Amino acid sequence: MPRESKKARTERAAEVFDLLHVEYPDAHCELNFSTPFQLAVATILSAQTTDVRVNMVTPVLFARYPNAELLANAQQEDVEGIVRTTGFFRNKAKNIIGFARRLMGEHGGVVPRTIAELSALPGVGRKTANVVLGNAFDINEGVVVDTHIRRLSTLLRFTREKTPEKIEQDLIKIVPSERWTLLAHLLIWHGRRVCDARKPRCEACVISHLCPSSRV
């Protein structure tokens, strides 16, 4: 593909967004949650596993520990037993208990609304902070970069970077801020439903004509 100007890449990104929005008009966060606290916990648990798997354990977890105060006082082994099937369960249990304790100690149990404050909490990186801000508070502070978004952004030649932080910065430059949260959902939904990592279905892809990596 010949070198693309930033203007051309921005225009192509807008077309990709619009087509995916038509294809997935109901695209949303697929983690189940009722509160910002629950979304943060679910997102921490989602590392290295699927949303489907997380949604299988959070009903039990949130029934027993629906808020930060209760989870902050939980026993590690009890939480491990609930989240075991999400993988890396000891570390995840430690992180969500630590998250709840710091939330109680520093924020009175209320989930903060800034990247800096969220990222300072145990188990919360920039990706989790962006998920919480965008989906619990409707704050477009940045773009979530997970494995699907990293892969599709590379295939679409929206970035040549390798790290989530740098990929996010490239996406921010070509997509308006009011679209950042929904952009992540659209790319994730497309990655899960059509642009499979092992066998992408380019023939069924609504943006194949805009994708430099298309096989059709």
Image: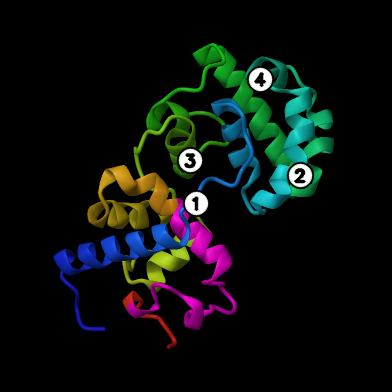
* Residue marked by disc 4: 67
* Residue marked by disc 1: 27
Can the viewer see residue 145 in this picture? no
Can the viewer see residue 95 in this picture? yes
* Residue marked by disc 2: 56
Q: Give the residue type that dot 3 points to.
A: Val
Q: Which residues are magenta?
A: 185-209
Vertical placement of residue 197 versus 164, above or below: below
Identify the image quadrant of the N terminus: bottom left
Q: Give the residue type that dot 2 points to.
A: Met
Closest to the camera, between mark 1 and mark 2, is 1
Q: CA distance from mark 2 to mark 4?
A: 18 Å
Q: Earlier in the sequence, mark 1 or mark 3?
A: 1
* Residue marked by disc 3: 131
Give percent across and percent down for residue 107.
50, 15
Q: Are marks 3 and 2 in contact (CB under 8 Å)?
A: no
Q: Earlier in the sequence, mark 4 or mark 3?
A: 4
Q: Give the residue type that dot 4 points to.
A: Asn
